[in-house]
Amino acid sequence: MNFSAQRSAMSLHGHANAFSNMFQDNQRMQAYRTAIEKLVTPESVVADVGTGMGVLALFAARAGARKVYAIERVPEAAELARKNIAANGYSDKIDVLVDDAETIRLPEKVDILVTETMGTTGVDEQIQNLAGAFARNNLKLDGIAVPHSVRSMIAPSDFSHLAHALDSSLSIADFDWSVLKALPGDDNMSFRMPETEFIPLGPPAILDDVTVGLTEVPAADPLRINLTIDRPGIIRSFVMWFEADMMPALDPALKIVNYPGQTRASWSCGIFTVGAPVAVQAGDSLVVSVDTGRRQHSLNWSLRWMKNKS
């Protein structure tokens, strides 16, 4: 095998592996399938923005859409989507296009925009920019986007990977690890929380709320919010996740949520570890400023916070 062929095969294999967790996420797959099946009619023209392996496009075709455009900017993923679509007999109904969703102009306006460009915190794969730009050029004025909206949530937390490891290791549980638990964090974002019952130190707040497919430019970073503490503890991190409403007008209960510690979501949550752990009491309030990088498809988050003086 020559180098270029080997590199292509490795790239295809990597894309297939990246989607394996998604396919096993029944909440995710069923929410999209249910929404698409309820919305699509025989006259529907559907666009799947960021089609990946072509799953959402296949849902739309099987639901009876007249035409489906599957848009993917990564050529290797688009090639896999074409093969998947051909294997299922929908090549005549689904066009796979290797293009940029923000600039593409389809030969016709679409009735339904479906997209799965939600990252760990909902907005960090630029869903508002991508879907908004696509909608300006290609979505009918009365068109529908799935999901309809995405909320990024944030809550103060006493979780840290080190503290969790010390508390959950049975072989060392009978020692005092308070010195290690007091060590400063590294002020960065991680994306994995062990299966655990997550209980925040205070009620979550909405960090960002995006209506998918709106054409307005998103508000500039940083986002500034207030948080309150309702139980005593030590702040070691701020934890972020998202809630997506798929089609609230027809089915308000149809959602996708990657709440921390659950096993059914293929998305991880975002865990921003703070520097020095800080003790807090019920009734304390915090001011948090977050730069999400949402304008440039980035996970280089920065977070600043301070405890309000009593």
Image: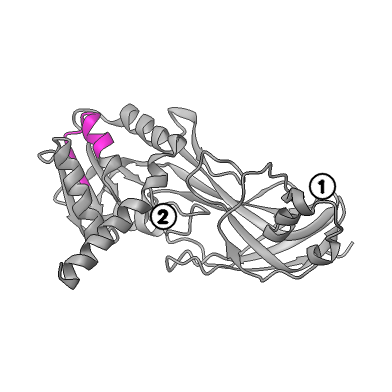
Q: Position of residue 137 (x, y in %)?
A: 25, 55
For the magenta stretch, what is the residue range? Answer: 58-69
Q: Is residue 112 visible?
A: no
Label 2 sits on a secondary structure element that is: helix
Residue 297 painted magenta = no
**Badge 1, how many Cα within 10 Å: few under 14, some, many 20+?**
some
Label 1 sits on a secondary structure element that is: loop
Q: Position of residue 185 (x, y in %)?
A: 71, 69
Question: Residue reaching furthest left?
Answer: 92
Amino acid type at mark 1: Asp
Q: Is residue 116 visible?
A: yes
Amino acid type at mark 2: Ile
Instruction: Residue at 69% x, 44% y: name it.
Output: 198
For marks 2 and 1, the one nearer the N-term is 2
Q: Is residue 170 left or right of residue 247?
A: right
| Residue 234 drawn above or below residue 143 | below
Residue 63 painted magenta = yes
The residue wearing badge 1 is 230
Disc 2/disc 1 C-alpha distance (Å): 33 Å
Q: Quadrant of the N terminus?
A: bottom left
**Badge 2, how many Cα within 10 Å: few under 14, some, many 20+?**
many
Which disc is residue 127 wearing? 2
